[in-house]
Amino acid sequence: MNKELEKTLMEKYPKIFPQKTEETKDEPIYEWGIECHDGWYNLLDSCFDLIQRYIDSRYDKTKQVIACQIKQKYGSLRFYYDGGDDVVDGIVRTIEYLSHDICEDCGTSGPVKTVCNSCNNLSKSSKKFYAEQFEFNFNG
């Protein structure tokens, strides 16, 4: 994710992204940042908003969620964290499931096609040919 969007999320949700400490310095979130593309920004924003509103409404009955790692894995979003409860787990699993149908690059909803690097690098004319033949929707 571009650093500006990442910074926006981290500043908007300071309880989920606390300042790096000696205890948390080795967490991947502090080493690598948010490891996905900008298209999932709104999905992550919604996820963090739901989680933080829920935790704040629980009056210290639910342990604060702290982000450990956020990345793309096997074509979908993965959010690893400490804290929370079964409700938070449900929110995270739902957001991860929704990411299957949201383009990681542009955020467009709908069926997303997984392709290898070779197919992704097809020329525009080849993309047009395949789009017409197989009704694929290529961005480009």
Image (spheres, rainbow, N blue to C red):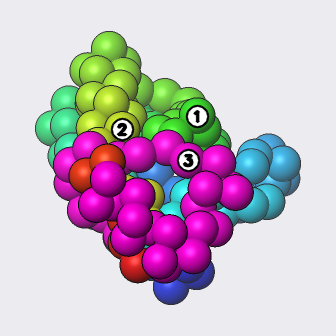
Closer to the N terminus: mark 1 or mark 3? 1
The secondary element bearing badge 1 is classed as loop
Range shown magenta: 106-133
Closer to the N terminus: mark 1 or mark 2? 1
Point out residue 111 in the picture as x, y percentages from the top left corner: 26, 44
Q: Which amino acid, mark 2?
A: His
The secondary element bearing badge 3 is classed as loop
Q: Residue at point 75% right, 46% down?
A: 27
The residue singled out by tag 3 in the image is 115
Up-down relation of residue 13 to residue 43 (above or below):
below
Q: Is residue 21 left or right of residue 83?
A: right
The residue singled out by tag 2 in the image is 100
Q: Residue at point 49% right, 28% down?
A: 83
Up-down relation of residue 98 to residue 32 (above or below):
above
Up-down relation of residue 91 to residue 6 (above or below):
above
Q: Residues within 10 Å of mark 3 (few under 14, many from 20)?
A: few
